Image (cartoon, grey):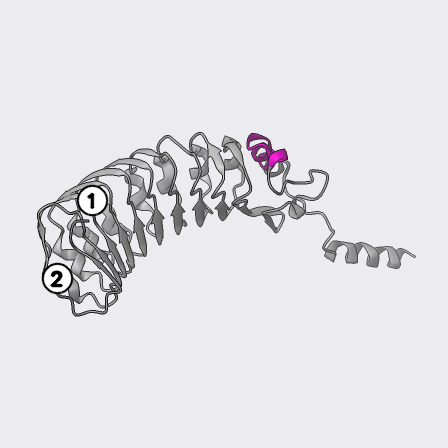
Amino acid sequence: MKKLALTFAFLLALSPIAYSQISDLEKSALLDLYKSTKGTTWNINWDLTKDVASWNGITVENNTVTEINLSMNNLTGPIPATIGNLTSLRHLNLGFNKISGIIPAELATIESLVTIQLFMNQLGGEIPSAIGNLTNLKELVLFNNFLEGNLPQSVYDITNLEILQLSSNKLTGAISPSIKNLSHLKTLSLFDNAMNGILPPQIGSLSNLTELSLANNSFEGTIPTEINQLLKLETLLLFNNKFTGKISPSIQNLPKLLNFEFNNLNEVEVSSTFTNPLTQVSLMPQ
């Protein structure tokens, strides 16, 4: 009988209905998120009587929360500071909701984070200055919010970053020459902000860049010839800025460039003859 009981206990431990044993601190952090963003009105809410691992959008591994994916789920309200207690979180996707308030500084204490996706919400304030602590981060996707202020200098310390999408916010200031530190960057999207200053020539050292979208800002000066070194570049959007001078004709020789828009640049002269197979070219004011 004892042997049978032990066997049953073993099978129960392997069963998908076995409860995960996340800490009270982590469960409390999830409940704070639920309450703060009006969980009862979510498109798919949680049955709080059931195991955390069964909650929609929550991934639990080794009795700790590793992923939250609640995109397009009608979350409404601020992200609570206690989200910082999810110390093993790797992926956070709260995109396409109605999240307001600021990005809590505590989020920047979760050093395990690999992706942060908070796009298409109503977030304001500045990007936390401690964001550079997230050295494992590969994706920072915050487009279509109301974020303001300069890019924190610490962003340039996230050397594993591959995707930086901050378009359609209210960001100001310039791109730092420290952009050269982001050698793994594939997407740099800052269009539709209020950024200014010159484009640092160090941008040409981003050899993995496939998209450079800086349109609808107030960048000025000449377009650095170092852009011609971005041999993987497929999309280059620089229109509606305050650039002057000439664009080097050699930019047409970028082998992968498919979407090339310079329209509405002030006093820019560029050859209209291109030898590479561009699928979308827009050079003249519209």
Q: Residue at x 24, y 63 (%)?
A: 257
Q: Is residue 185 magenta?
A: no
Identify residue for label 2.
Answer: 272
Q: Secondary structure at mark 1?
A: loop
Q: Residue at x 37, y 30 (%)?
A: 125
- x and y percent of residue 139 in the render? 40, 50
- x and y percent of residue 215 in the render? 24, 46
Q: Is residue 226 above or below residue 219?
A: below
Identify residue for label 1.
Answer: 240
Q: Is residue 39 magenta?
A: yes
- x and y percent of residue 76 in the render? 53, 33
Q: Which tag, 2 or 1, sits closer to the chain's start?
A: 1
**Secondary structure predominantly adopted by residues drawn in magenta:** helix
- x and y percent of residue 80 in the render? 51, 31
Quarter in which the N terminus is drawn: bottom right
Q: Is residue 69 above or below residue 129?
A: below
- The disc labelled 2 sits on which kind of residue? Ser
Which segment is the magenta one?
Answer: 28-41
Q: Quadrant of residue 228?
A: bottom left
Q: Secondary structure at mark 2?
A: loop
